[in-house]
């Protein structure tokens, strides 16, 4: 498995992965296209070969801020439990540090036990709760990690 920066030719595979990974709150094709061309976003993919995507991560940077935001972390259903999330998360943390970020934040569904375990195992600490955060009304936990 290899983690790399996503390129425009990954667009179809990214959209397909999004559809297989999430029931709602999905990134659209237009959003991915915009993020692939943005200086304030980084899209990473984990692949078994150049075209078979096992997972993806979308990281946002805001100008003038030292806080990066992990907006999305997706793992293909057939690749879950194989270290894809761990590899992507390590690459996200490394990318945020290289961009000068001092902290990384994210939101996760309160009912997503596997993702919560992943984030907590990698040093993220719960810092808040958002009621009715997702389109289906589910709550989210806010997590942060200091990168300094």
Image (cartoon, grey):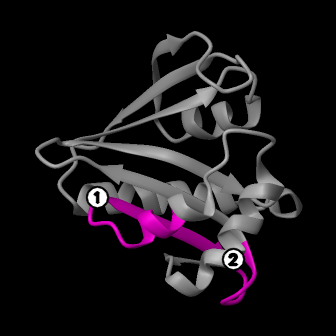
In the image, is residue 49 above or below residue 110? below
Please tell me which residue lies in front, 132 or 56.
132
Residue shown at 68% from the left, 27% from the top: 135
The stretch drawn in magenta includes residue 43: yes
Residue shown at 52% from the left, 12% from the top: 129
Visible residue check, residue 144? yes
Query: Do the CB atoms of the residues marked 2 and 1 lie less than 8 Å apart?
Result: no
Secondary structure state at the residue bearing disc 2: helix
Visible residue check, residue 87? no
- Dot 1 corresponds to which residue? 40
Q: Quadrant location of residue 49?
A: bottom right
Q: Quadrant location of residue 35?
A: bottom left
Q: Is residue 26 left or right of residue 105?
A: right
Label placed on residue 12: 2
Q: Is residue 28 left or right of residue 125?
A: right
**x, y (%) of residue 32?**
53, 64
**x, y (%) of residue 66?**
18, 42
Residue at the far right: name it.
Answer: 78
Please tell me which residue lies in front, 85 or 69.
69
Secondary structure state at the residue bearing disc 1: loop
In the image, is residue 23 above or below residue 1? above
Q: Quadrant location of residue 140?
A: top right
**x, y (%) of residue 64?**
10, 45
Q: Is residue 145 left or right of residue 116?
A: left
Magenta stretch bounds: 32-53
């Amino acid at each position: 498995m290899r983690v790399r920066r996503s390129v425009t030719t990954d667009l179809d595979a990214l959209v397909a992965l999004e559809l297989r990974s999430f029931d709602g709150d999905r990134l659209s094709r237009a959003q991915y296209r915009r993020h692939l061309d943005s200086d304030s976003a980084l899209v990473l993919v984990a692949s078994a070969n150049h075209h078979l995507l096992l997972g993806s991560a979308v990281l946002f940077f805001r100008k003038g801020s030292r806080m990066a935001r992990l907006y999305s972390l997706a793992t293909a259903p057939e690749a879950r439990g194989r270290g894809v999330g761990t590899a992507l998360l390590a690459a996200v943390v490394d990318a945020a540090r290289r961009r000068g970020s001092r902290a990384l934040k994210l939101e996760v569904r309160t009912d997503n036990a596997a993702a919560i375990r992943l984030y907590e195992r990698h040093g993220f600490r719960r810092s808040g709760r958002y009621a009715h955060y997702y389109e289906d009304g589910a709550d989210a936990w806010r997590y942060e990690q200091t990168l300094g």
